[in-house]
Image (cartoon, rainbow, N blue to C red):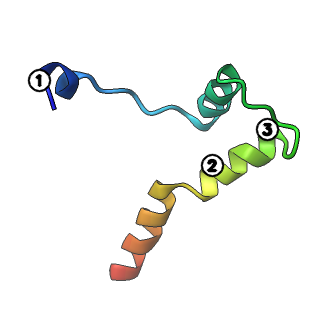
């Protein structure tokens, strides 16, 4: 990884910003609503899985 690439960090998007970003990428919400997509992002992302696993180890 080059030094320039290493120093560039993206900020984490909120769930609403994620939905907006998907729309900008031409993702259509025909099969599920935006609210359903937001709920999926909130409950089924990697961070959720890690924190759920972390709770088991305590």
Which one is nearer the viewer's eye here, 27 or 13? Answer: 27
How far apart, in angstroms, are the residues tagged by discs 1 and 2? 32 Å
Which residue matches tag 2?
41
User: For the point 73% across and 45% down, which residue is it?
Assistant: 37
Residue 56 falls left or right of residue 43: left
- Residue 47 position by quadrant: bottom left
Other-residue count near label 3 (Cα within 10 Å), few / some / many at <14 / 14–19 / ≥20: some
Q: Is residue 21 shown left or right of residue 26? A: left
Q: x and y percent of residue 14 in the render? A: 55, 34
Residue in the image at 26% along x and 22% along y: 8
Q: Is residue 25 above or below residue 29?
A: above
Q: Residue 49: where, in percent of width, then height? A: 48, 65
Image quadrant in which you'd find residue 21: top right
Residue lying farthest bottom? 57
Q: Earlier in the sequence, mark 1 or mark 3?
A: 1
Residue placed under numbered mark 1 in the picture: 3
Callout 1–callout 3 Cβ contact below 8 Å = no
């Amino acid at each position: 990884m080059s030094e320039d690439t290493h120093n560039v960090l993206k900020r984490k998007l909120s769930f609403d910003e994620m939905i907006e970003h998907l729309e900008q990428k031409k993702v259509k919400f025909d099969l599920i609503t935006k609210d359903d997509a937001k709920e999926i992002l909130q409950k089924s992302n990697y961070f959720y899985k890690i924190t759920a696993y972390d709770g088991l180890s305590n």
